[in-house]
Amino acid sequence: MSKTLYVGNLPWATTDEDLAAFFSNATEVLASRVIIDRATGRSKGFGFVEVPEDQAEQVIAMMNGKELGGREIIVNEARPLNTTS
């Protein structure tokens, strides 16, 4: 099983590959995705990293507050998208 982590406060130039490489120092990265604004084609400054479930808490503790590209990133467990309004 895997767990998806939210990663916020990303530098605008961060790519999916940059995010995966940064987190690969801490754990096996199963998938990574930086969210892009469809209208502008620019990063929205956050993304998601999928990691093995048994390592998620350790990765959050290790990576939250780390610096990436001069910015202190925020890492926590991703919450499901609320599709009801």
Image: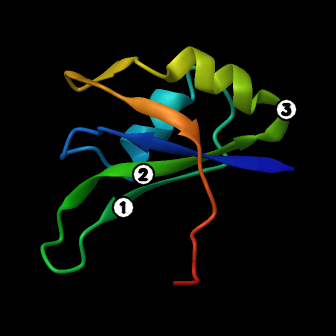
Give the CA distance from mark 2 to mark 3: 21 Å
Report helix, strand or loop for mark 1.
Answer: strand
Give 44 or 68, whichever is nearer the viewer: 44
Extreme residue in the front direction = 85
Image side of residue 24 versus residue 10, left or right: right
Number of the label disc, if any, that sits on residue 54:
3
Q: Residues within 10 Å of mark 1 (few under 14, many from 20)?
A: some
Image side of residue 56 versus residue 37, left or right: right
**Residue at x 12% of width, y 73% of height:** 40
Report helix, strand or loop for mark 2.
Answer: strand
Q: Quadrant of residue 71?
A: top left
Proximity of marks 2 and 3: CB atoms separated by less than 8 Å: no
Which residue is disc 2 drawn over? Answer: 47
**Residue at x 77% of width, y 28% of height:** 55
Across and down, in percent, residue 53 comes to 81, 40
The three-letter amino acid code for the residue at tag 3 is: Asp
**Residue at x 57% of width, y 29% of height:** 24
Position of 64 relative to 3 (above/below):
above
Across and down, in percent, residue 73 comes to 36, 29
**Residue at x 51% of width, y 84% of height:** 85
Image side of residue 13 versus residue 20, left or right: left
Mark 1 or mark 3: name the one nearer the start of the chain.
1
Image side of residue 8 versus residue 64, left or right: left
Which residue is disc 1 drawn over? Answer: 35
Give the CA distance from mark 1 to mark 2: 5 Å
Report helix, strand or loop for mark 3.
Answer: helix
The three-letter amino acid code for the residue at tag 1 is: Ile
Give the CA distance from mark 1 to mark 3: 25 Å
Proximity of marks 1 and 2: CB atoms separated by less than 8 Å: yes
Mark 2 or mark 3: name the one nearer the start of the chain.
2
Q: Residues within 10 Å of mark 3 (few under 14, many from 20)?
A: few
